[in-house]
Image: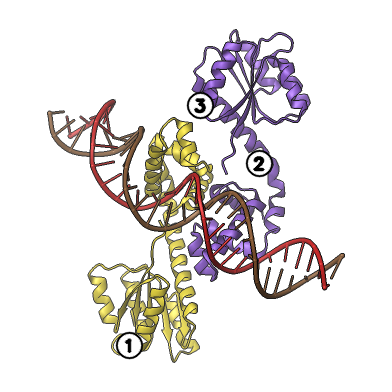
Chain colours: A yellow, B purple, C red, D brown
Amino acid sequence: MTKSIHLALIDDDEAVLDSLCLYLHSQKIATASFSTAQEFLAALQQHKQFDCIVSDVRMPGMSGLDLVRELKSRNVGAPIVLITGHGDVDMAVAAIKVGAADFIEKPFDESRLLASVRNAIEESQQRENFGEQKDLPVKFESLTARQRQVMELAVAGLSNKEIGSRLDISPKTVENHRAWVMERIGARNIAELVRLAMKYDRQS
Amino acid sequence: MTKSIHLALIDDDEAVLDSLCLYLHSQKIATASFSTAQEFLAALQQHKQFDCIVSDVRMPGMSGLDLVRELKSRNVGAPIVLITGHGDVDMAVAAIKVGAADFIEKPFDESRLLASVRNAIEESQQRENFGEQKDLPVKFESLTARQRQVMELAVAGLSNKEIGSRLDISPKTVENHRAWVMERIGARNIAELVRLAMKYDRQS
DNA sequence: TAGACCTTGGGTAATTTCACCTAGGTGCTA
DNA sequence: TAGCACCTAGGTGAAATTACCCAAGGTCTA
């Protein structure tokens, strides 16, 4: 249900890489480390997916800023958080302008980074949801009659058991329908489903 | 969480009373039987509460229709479902006009009655909720800052664990806050909370 | 200072949801 | 007739929610 976070961490300083990696793992965030931007891009080529990318700015070869530009031109949706030891305002401004999600100066609190990452992911997901809103009617109208019945009762706050007795089917069947609804609508939990259903109701 | 249904069943025909009672019990609905409207009204005097009243129309003494009128004049909110063996359209129209929730002709399928009862209860609850909407801002504004934070993240679809790590408190504490929020807002589950929160957002 | 309230967090137990799976029956269609 | 989508419903196991209980520490106020 709750998707785990897959994060890419890019820094040429091994010590930084290791310490952050340890911390992130302790926060149950799957972290892949890369010493250079090129290494990371190679991983991307192999169809690896990341929910967020954390990269140092000053690195041999491709800089963090260059990486942001490269990813934007490739239409990579994952948010990019830049970290740097020698930042200045202009650099920060430039980073955000080219599309970095955040720009953090070292030394920083590890929890500060984590908060930034989470925030970035949430914002990018919200952007995704926003983009998806236009095919919301399509999604809801693709539901079968049964699925819609189940969805409406679920959104009304009834438990699977209650829905089952209401529709005269087993709670297990309700569960199955519900899972289909979730998948079709693209909701990760009831809260999201309720929100989308309400949006749909208002739109149509 | 899921409130059990307390139902009053009124019919002068013992056979009908017994058979319906049996069925309703099998559906886990607490049912109190009465042979006459007067008996039922006496129970009401003793502060008994019912979520729904199912009554025959043709009965010695007070008729079902009279009962509906009586209850309406007493401002009894519980919905009343009328059942009858010798109904006609006019009677049905009259019944609904005076405020009966439904009017069902015998013989009927037991599940038909059950569906009607549930529908009636749901509608009456929705009316209640509608009446409550005006103090919705009061409820939301009575939340403490922490409770509001937790509520917002919960409504966004995060699990207690996620909320905890986001706010840097234990999931257990989140759970406690969440329970408080539910109680204060008067929501029986997340679906309801999301709906109320969205209403509040739009209102204010 | 005592009481009220908030925040924090632990425990236990029942219930529910979620994510997988299999599988039979129905009805439509290429 | 074979394939497909749908409804049905069961199983397992992990995770989450809910409903209770409890207690300690902080703040604010009568």
What number is the disc on residue B129?
2
Q: Chain of mark 2?
A: B
Front residue (pair A145, B71): B71
Write down the residue under mark 1.
A14
Residue type at mark 1 is Glu
Nearer the viewer's eye, disc 2 or disc 1? 1
Mark 2 element type:
helix
Nearer the viewer's eye, disc 1 or disc 3? 3
Res A143 seen here: no
Q: Chain of mark 1?
A: A
What number is the disc on residue B26?
3
Q: Residue at x 35, y 83 (%)?
A: A18
Residue A88 point in image, percent of width and height = 48, 90
The mark nearer the N terminus, 3 or 2, is 3
Asked whether the residues under the numbered discs 3 and 2 touch, taking CB atoms below 8 Å apart as contact, a structural biologist would say: no
Residue type at mark 3 is Ser
Mark 3 element type:
helix
Q: Residue B143 is drawn in which quadrant?
A: bottom right
Front residue (pair A173, A50): A173
Mark 1 element type:
helix
- Residues at marks 1 and 3, CA–CA distance in whole angstroms: 68 Å
Residue B142 point in image, percent of width and height = 71, 58
Residue type at mark 2 is Asn
Against A48, is B140 above or below? Answer: above
Asked whether the residues under the numbered discs 2 and 1 touch, taking CB atoms below 8 Å apart as contact, a structural biologist would say: no
For the N terminus of chain A, give its image quadrant.
Answer: bottom left
- Residues at marks 3 and 2, CA–CA distance in whole angstroms: 29 Å
Q: Chain of mark 3?
A: B
